[in-house]
Amino acid sequence: MRGVAKDASDSIDAIRAEFRFVESLSIEYQNNPPSVFASVIGRAEKLPVGLVSDGVNKLLSILLGIATFTGATALVDEFENGIYYDRLESFWRTVYAFARFNDVQLFATTHSQESLQALRSVLQNNARDFCLLRAEKSDASGTSTIRRFEGEQLVSALTKNGEIR
């Protein structure tokens, strides 16, 4: 680990930009262990982030992980889970920008063609920063191989609606 984030202000700003109904985030010591709570427009009391939205919770977890381990590698399993389909593109954009800013190599898994299509707009201007690793069974014995597709190949396949999952 090269560096550790001093504060979470960039993560909070990204959450507030993505979810306009979140006014602020704070760590509350009402429960053991301490938890992240959100002030939400229209609610007098703060709510645990997990009760506000799966999307808020997921994005916050990813961004805090990236910010905490600057210069390292982050793994996100099933990137699209908990995210409303219409927000996938902005999530990809936010996570990519955050990972790039924090010098973090991101490995994200997905089984969703919809999620990959949402990534396309981010890929088009940043193809050199991406590649797809796809596991394929290579024979009847179940042996698998990993195929690597460079960012330009990925953009091309997504543009042609190719099946790449």
Image: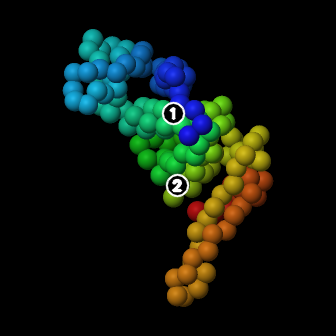
Closest to the observer: 33 or 137?
Answer: 33
Check disc 2 and report the residue beneath it. Answer: 110
Apparent side of residue 152 relative to residue 43 in the rendered image (left or right): right
Check disc 1 and report the residue beneath it. Answer: 68
- Amino acid under disc 1: Thr
Q: Given this view, does label 2 or label 1 mark the residue nearer the observer? A: 1
Closest to the observer: 96 or 160?
Answer: 96
State the image coordinates of residue 86 (x, y, percent, origin top left).
52, 38
Of the 4 image quadrants, the one containing the N terminus is top right
**Which numbered disc flags the more N-terminal residue, 2 or 1?**
1
State the image coordinates of residue 83 (x, y, percent, origin top left).
45, 41
Q: Residue, x 52% and y 22% (percent of image)? A: 6
Of the 4 image quadrants, the one containing the C terminus is bottom right
Q: Residue, x 60% and y 37% (percent of image)? A: 2
Residue 10 sits in which quadrant?
Answer: top right
- Amino acid under disc 2: Thr
Q: Residue, x 62% and y 49% (percent of image)? A: 117
Residue 126 sits in which quadrant?
Answer: top right
Q: Residue, x 61% and y 65% (percent of image)? A: 134
Work out whether residue 66 can be spotted.
no
Q: Is residue 16 above or below residue 68?
A: above
* Local crowd size for mark 1, using a 10 Å CA cut-off: few (<14), some (14–19), many (≥20): some
State the image coordinates of residue 76 (x, y, percent, origin top left).
50, 48
